[in-house]
Amino acid sequence: MSTHVLAAGPVGDPTTTVSVFVGFVLMTLYVVYRVSNRNATASDYYVAGGNITGAQNGIALAGDWLSAASFLGVAGAIAVHGYDGFLYSVGFLVAWLLELMLIAELVRNTGRFTMGDVIAYRMKPRPVRAAAANTALVISFFYMVAQMASAGGLVALLLDVQSKFGQALVLVFVGIVMVLYVLIGGMKGTTWVQIIKALLLLVCVTLMAIFLLGKFSYNLSDLLDRAAAHSPLGQGLLQPGAQYGGSQTSRLDFVSLAMAIVLGISCLPHIMMRFYTVPSAREARRSVVWITWTMIIFYLATLFLGYGATALVGSEAIQHAPGKENSAALLLAHRIGGSPLLGVVAAIAFATILAVVAGLTLTASAAFAHDVYANVIKRGKADAESEIRVARLTALVVGVLSTAGGIAAIGQNAAFMVSLALALAASANLPTVLYSLFWRRFNTAGTLWSMYTGLVSSIVLIVFSPAVSGKESSMFPDVDFHWFPLSNPGLVSIPLAFFAGFVGTLFGGKEQDPARQAEMEVRSLTGVGSGLVEPRRD
Amino acid sequence: MTRAPDGSLRSRPGGPKPEPRFGNIAQDSLRRQATSAEPDFTAIRESGDFRSLRRRFRLFMFPMTLLVLAWYFTYAVLGAYAEDFMSARVLGSINVGLLLGLAQFATTALVVLLYGSYVRRRIDPLVDRIRERAEGGPR
């Protein structure tokens, strides 16, 4: 039973898709313009003056987190690789518990705009801030390039733009819109784009999942059977090992990926920055609770959508469509609701990319302007006005660079680049954040050792991994310089960074200031001295 | 024009309290300036309240985090190395692996609820008391 999806030609009606999308962009630009009449202080620009409520921030977090890779990518991975793709859903969900219990509230209490604020609290501020800014910029850049590259694939699928030049042109358009969001709206505008997009995405995905289950009379087993029948894997679709089974190395790779996923999310710079937009630690807690409930619904729906795409569209058709795995959710939308639904889902997918890259651009510009410019170059004596000017300029530069990077990376596997960013975040940021919050002896030397070891080791291991060279699926399939067996470095680089932080601290001696240490310990748990006031409710 | 004072500027003595603004997104949560001078953090850290706050925090967060991670990695490692077990069918085509995956969703929801009730009962009242004493008016 084959379906009528053609290998070439646009899926659905490009006019519908484009008009729904342009409608979305115009609407959000209008909202951004309306909400952002005052972006005068650095606090307004970076963190919306800290006046977003917990619920709003929770939804915006969902908007920031649910990137093209975690929406289209996960649905596609489940559709094609079945059970192994499900690991992403579980990991992406469980990771938020770490954020909830160990990070969100303490980070809100100790910092102001960026992650650099937290770790520079009781260390020598200049080298530590420079390190934090470096890791934030590298992580955000990889993340952004992945988003932009998947936008290229989306264009190929929807508008039938096959030429590299045409795709590049669309990416330039995406780049311009995202820089506009950030420059006009600052954090407040970006937040509202993310809220709108997250709500649309959630409603759409949930309705599609309910409809799909309804088609199988709410019998999950029937849905799974039908999916298995339409996949070359057969029953293997429902079992582990389709993608990572077989050799010992690939099993280990599965564990490494699982580790990077669960430990990486809580330390992504653009996720951490969102906690500064709420007025207090308890609102930060509320935002994580909101996003966790949201993620439970979303990833349950994605499970059904992924298997549903295989059941209704078929694995073969998905893999032969332009955009391959990433097109599963779109092909399913087309199958269920024809061109109008496809237009809506595609517009949401585009909006997703816009919202996520806007958040990343803002984070990168904050990392540079607040940490590097204001605190390292100007030694904390920069006036707010010039800091914002630098931040806006950085946003522009970051926009240009990531657009260029995205154009160069068109056709690369977006999920791979995102898992790279997650491994980087888990190795470079997580050990430092945890140590500086919970280990009294941790010092500047430990911070620098840990951050740079994590950053450099994961980049080196990635470069010499089979993901980059030596295999058919690699970035450069024709050359082979790989010596590291795993395609995800997390299993090695994360423990290594923890270890480096420990050893560095022992070598660093006792240079720290006990008063600052006491201040950080008290402030992180209670918020005393942070100037933040817990809203009185109930 | 009054603007919410920046929260990071600690201890501006006698700083003006911001006017409550109607229609603000979070008008009940405008920042308040610390009225007294810099609190004595070392003294707070040594106080009984803070010690028990720290103990209660660590008593819940550390074991729970380890438990969550252990349960998650058990699930991931079973998927990598115990394919036969994970592929065993339970209900129609629903197998152990899928059920364990869905169980992760359920435990995540459970931990969120447990965390919420724990911090409301055991953490927040202590935090309020410590803050009250440290910055709420004259001691």
Image: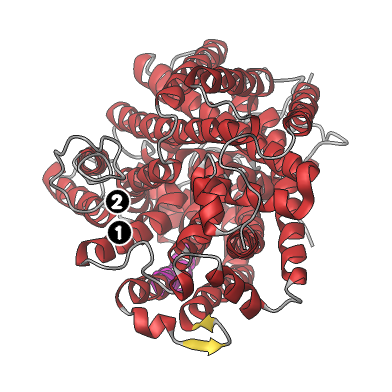
Q: Badge 1 local density, few (<14 within 10 Å), some, or many (20+)?
A: many
Residue beneath disc 1: A256
Residue pictured at 79% horizontal, 18% vertical: B1
Seen in the picture, residue B75 relative to B16 is either above or below; the reply is below
Residue pictured at 38% horizontal, 45% vertical: A416
Q: Is residue A528 visible?
A: no
Q: Position of residue A447 (x, y in %)?
A: 26, 41
As drawn, the residue found furthest toward the front would be A1
Residues in magenta, as a range: B50-69
Q: CA distance from mark 2 to mark 1?
A: 6 Å
- Is A286 a magenta residue? no
Q: Quadrant of the C terminus of chain A?
A: bottom right
Residue beneath disc 2: A488
The amino acid sitting under disc 1 is: Ser
Question: What's the chain of the residue with tag 1?
Answer: A
Q: Is residue A72 left or right of residue B47?
A: right
Q: Are marks 2 and 1 on the same chain?
A: yes
Q: Position of residue A360 (x, y in %)?
A: 52, 32
| SS for dot 1 | helix
Q: Is residue A36 visible?
A: yes
Q: Position of residue A81 (x, y in %)?
A: 45, 61
Mark 2 touching mark 1, by CB under 8 A? yes
Seen in the picture, residue A433 relative to A398 is either above or below; the reply is below
Seen in the picture, residue A177 relative to A456 is either above or below; the reply is above
As drawn, the residue found furthest toward the bottom would be B90
